[in-house]
Image (cartoon, rainbow, N blue to C red):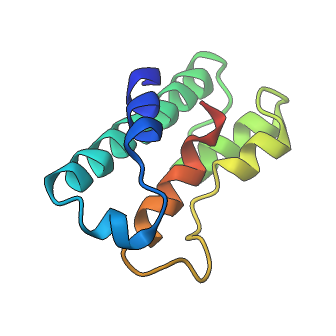
Amino acid sequence: MTESVVLVKEHLPDSADSFRQLGIVKDGIYKRVEYAIENVFDICAILNADLHLGVPGTDENILDNLVQYGVLAAAARQNLKLEAVPQASGVLAPFLRHFELIKVC
């Protein structure tokens, strides 16, 4: 997971226009981000299950349980929010939303 985040940081361009022109590299960035996010949520799910914090219906419920029982700080929970980044550039909106999720790494 750390390797994916490092690779994304190293290859992320400075502008939306540059990002649009990356072609297949852009696809690789999306995949690396997706992989890192899935790992974060898998770890949260494992903690929720191992600590017997309840049966969650969604990833949001897992995060809520972790905050409620003091496993995850509310500030860290905010970094993992699933809402889209408001007013983000069209092509970068999904990436920026996902990048917000992996800030905790």
In front of the other: 55 or 93: 93
For this view, does 23 lie left or right of residue 38? Answer: left
Which residue is located at x 48 percent, y 54 percent?
Answer: 98
Q: Is residue 10 above or below residue 20?
A: above
Quarter residue 91 falls in: bottom left
* Residue found at the far top of this picture: 50
- Give percent across and percent down for residue 33: 39, 44
Quarter residue 28 falls in: top left
For this view, does 79 lie left or right of residue 3? Answer: right
* On-image quarter of the N terminus: top left
Residue 89 appears in the rendering: yes
Q: Is residue 79 above or below residue 45?
A: below
Which residue is located at x 83 percent, y 36 percent?
Answer: 73
In front of the other: 40 or 25: 25
Which residue is located at x 52 percent, y 62 percent?
Answer: 97
For this view, does 73 lie left or right of residue 48? Answer: right
- Give percent across and percent down for residue 70: 85, 29
In front of the other: 35 or 46: 35
Which residue is located at x 46 percent, y 29 percent?
Answer: 6
